[in-house]
Image (cartoon, helix red, strand yellow):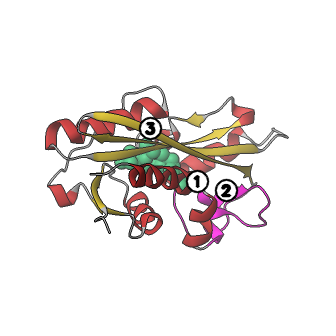
Amino acid sequence: MTEPRRLVFATNNSHKLSELRQIAGDGIIILSLADIGCEDDIPETGSTLEENSMIKARWVYERYGYDCFADDTGLEVTALGGEPGVRSARYATDGHDSAANMALLLRNLSDKADRSAGFRTVITLIEDGKASVFSGEVRGEIISEPSGSGGFGYDPVFRPEGWDKTFAEASPEEKNAVSHRGKAVARLIEYLKTIRK
Ligand code: ITT
């Protein structure tokens, strides 16, 4: 039996960190930025999810020397031309204010018949300086008002296809089984199994 890989997850979002640890189970030992003494507010200056996940992963690899991965996620709403997309964290304000972000989203959708949307996650893994990219998506729709207290971010307004409840009304296991992040992490873990380290 080979030992599970130890990788740093380059995120300042504690919800993402706990989701990742739950999804990865015994597949990867995940170190947080706090575990490696990194308190940086990593600038997200890219114009795509791919660029931002690369920037975050490279930041940690180059400054701290650890193999690591980063997640960049966006909510892409069809009637808004893919917005908020890469700006999902700062849609309404400069901070990560989920209530304000959801309120603005619902306002911008108030006159739209098409409520379809998807979450997309891009994960960039950097090992020995080499990048590998994994992605995952879930489709669904934006409901008319927030419902549920689980999850984080836009979860209270997102109902996955085929569900009768939002991600915020689901258990973590239910969300992770179908989610954007769950799918991207499954692909990352499959890849890690194919390489020996
Ligand atoms: P890091 O960059 O430090 O990882 P972040 O919160 O800034 O954390 P993103 O740049 O990927 O993460 O921002 C995406 C935003 O989209 C995030 O702040 C949430 O509001 C939202 N989001 C991400 N994943 C989500 C999920 O699984 N469910 C609901 N909303 C999510």
Secondary element under disc 1, as helix, strand or loop, is loop
Secondary element under disc 3, as helix, strand or loop, is strand
**Residue 133, disc:** 3
Magenta span: chief secondary structure: loop
107 or 148, which is in the foreground?
148
| Mark 1 nearby-residue class (10 Å; few <14, some 14–19, many ≥20) | many
Q: Is the CB atom of the residue marked by disc 1 within 8 angstroms of ligand 1's nearest atom?
A: yes
| Mark 2 nearby-residue class (10 Å; few <14, some 14–19, many ≥20) | many
What residue does disc 1 label?
A: 154
Apparent side of residue 62 relative to residue 187 in the rendered image (left or right): left
Secondary element under disc 2, as helix, strand or loop, is helix
What is the quadrant of the N terminus in the image?
bottom left
Q: Residue 130's spot in the image, x, y percent?
A: 30, 34
Q: Give yes or no for contact between labels 2 and 1 (Cβ–Cβ under 8 Å).
A: yes
Apparent side of residue 97 relative to residue 113 in the rendered image (left or right): left
Magenta stretch bounds? 145-170
Q: Is residue 5 above or below residue 148?
A: above
Q: Earlier in the sequence, mark 2 or mark 3?
A: 3
What residue does disc 2 label?
A: 157
Q: Residue at point 68% right, 29% down?
A: 81
Q: Residue 186's spot in the image, x, y percent?
A: 51, 55
Question: Amino acid type of disc 2?
Answer: Val
